[in-house]
Image: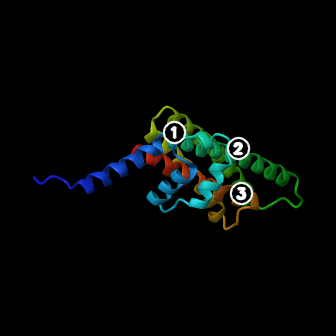
Amino acid sequence: MPRPSRALLMAALASLATLHGLAGVGATVEETCSAAASRDRRVDYGFCVSELSKHRDSPSADACGLAKVAANVGVNNAGAAVNDLEALLTAAAVQQPPPDARVTAALRLCEKLYYDMELAFAGAYDETNAHNYTAGRQMAADADSLVRRCTGGFAEAGLPPPEPVARRSAYAVQIAIVCTAITNLLISP
């Protein structure tokens, strides 16, 4: 069997060093988001960098830390969405004339799904923190599925989601994709 060329070995070592560096302390938000976007075309690189860079833990985080940052941001967004949904349901309860029953049903469904999404993102954080990356990735993917069910509830009712729900849902989908993609980097560098 012929021996690999020196150039091929050097290229392989450089690739390994780069991938290993993502799991190490030296990974930056930009490097990690770039690697995630190159692996998963659903990742919006600009969103990834912008949103992860806002978090206080990001400057010192490695790829594992950035997956946890994404999960934490997801928890916070889901919690804020629950607050928005509670406010919408409270307003609907006193609205005259009362809103279409389909609106109230879709809001209640979303409220339940966003509670579940908070738990899914929290689970993604915990599993990633425990280095159980496959379970962390699944929890982040579950969060993505939950938000799509929320917006699907409005679509099935033939209604557009209210602005806060549409905004929170678009954000939740993106942060779930980012969390899943970064966790994938940890599973198979």
Nearer to us in this view, 155 or 44: 44
Judged from the image, the secondary structure of the residue bearing numbered disc 2 is helix
Nearer to us in this view, 81 or 37: 37
Look at 47% across and 55% down and name the residue there: 35
Choose the circle earlier in sequence order: 2 or 3: 2
Res. 70 visible in picture: yes
Judged from the image, the secondary structure of the residue bearing numbered disc 3 is helix
Left or right: 189 in relation to 151: left
**Residue type pointed to by label 2:** Gly
Tag nearer the camera, 3 or 1: 1
Choose the circle earlier in sequence order: 1 or 2: 1
Left or right: 131 in relation to 55: left
Res. 112 visible in picture: no
**Residue type pointed to by label 3:** Val
The residue beneath circle 2 is 79
Q: CA–CA distance between discs 2 and 3?
A: 12 Å
The residue beneath circle 3 is 165
Image height check: is 136 above or below 18?
A: above
**Residue type pointed to by label 1:** Val
Tag nearer the camera, 1 or 2: 1
Look at 46% across and 42% down and name the residue there: 23
Choose the circle earlier in sequence order: 3 or 1: 1
Q: Position of residue 149 (x, y in %)?
A: 59, 55
Q: CA–CA distance between discs 3 and 1?
A: 36 Å
Judged from the image, the secondary structure of the residue bearing numbered disc 1 is loop
Q: Residue 25 shows which numbered tag?
A: 1
Q: Position of residue 34 (x, y in %)?
A: 51, 57
Look at 49% across and 54% down and name the residue there: 36
Q: Seen from this angle, which residue lies furthest left?
A: 1
Q: Position of residue 75 (x, y in %)?
A: 65, 43
Image height check: is 41 above or below 73?
A: below
Q: CA–CA distance between discs 1 and 2?
A: 30 Å
